Amino acid sequence: MRFSQLFKVFSLSFFVLTAGLAAQAAGSGSDKDAKRLNTVGDYIFEDPKGVNAITFVLDSPIEPIIGVATGISGPLHFETDNPMAFAGKIVVAATSLATTNSKMTEVLHSADWLDVENHPTLSFQIKGIRTAKKTAPGQCELVAVGEFTCKGITKEIVLPNLTVTFIKDGAKKRNRFEGDLIVVRTKFTITRTDYEINLATPFVAVADDIEIDVRMVGYTKKRN
């Protein structure tokens, strides 16, 4: 066998060997990334930055009203490799609901409206997950069924577009302390009629539909 032929055989063998090692290394890296994202945790929503908020809109013909709720607490349970296990309860302090007008906020808290003295919280309890679809590493879209309680009245609600995004070590980036994050996003609508919120006020002045927009961050542990 000539030297040139030996060189070709050696080169081909070396190429096959290095390609195999590279593929094995890439596979090992992928396995490590997958394991890194397979995390189980309970996430709290008392935000140390004070940024977490849920907005609500009553878009009536003559006076659209926009408000925000900030007194949010959890926890929620989330497993990156088993999103069907998503569970828990979100509670909102009724006194934290506010509009852009202070007098309107006082009225909102009164007995005819939210009656915060007798009903100090609103809540959403997850009762089950109908479907779960992974849309990216650590991210999934869920159809969730739960019970929304307002003013002491509880109704079943379906959330068809609930998105959960897991961020490994996200607390370091957001708050500079240890912990993972999940970001929960969803939108849904309730009505004043269903929850008996001052039905004496005509819908032309204050809309019956209350559009709720949730975008909030949960932590695996509290800040020290």
Image (tube, rainbow, N blue to C red):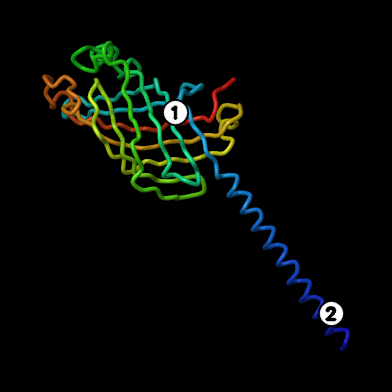
Q: Nearer the viewer, residue 203 or 82?
A: 82
- Tally the marks: 2
Image quarter of the C terminus? top right
**Quadrant of res 70:** top left
Q: Residue furthest bottom?
A: 1
Residue at x 31%, y 43% (from the top left corner):
160
Where residue 75 appears, x then y in whole percent? 44, 28
From the top left corner, tell me how far across and down residue 223 is, in percent. 57, 22
Q: Is residue 124 above or below residue 37?
A: above
Q: Is residue 190 left or right of residue 82?
A: left
SS at mark 1? loop
Crowding at label 2, few (<14), some or many (≥20) Cα neighbours within 10 Å?
few
As helix, strand or loop, the secondary structure at mark 2 comes to: helix
At label 1, the amino acid type is: Pro
Residue plotted at (76% across, 76% down) = 12
Q: Residues within 10 Å of mark 1 (few under 14, many from 20)?
A: many
119 vs 158: above or below: above
Q: Which residue is depicted at the point 28% across and 39% down? A: 158
Q: Quadrant of residue 37?
A: top right
Mark 2: which amino acid?
Answer: Phe
Is 109 left, or right, of 70 in this rendering? left
Label 2 sits on residue: 7
Quadrant in which the N terminus is drawn: bottom right
Residue 128 percent across, percent down from the top left: 34, 40
The reply, left or right, for residue 97 in relation to residue 166 is left
The residue closer to the viewer here, 14 or 28, is 28
2 or 1: tag closer to the N-terminus: 2
Q: Are marks 2 and 1 in contact (CB under 8 Å)?
A: no
Q: Indicate which disc residue 75 carries.
A: 1
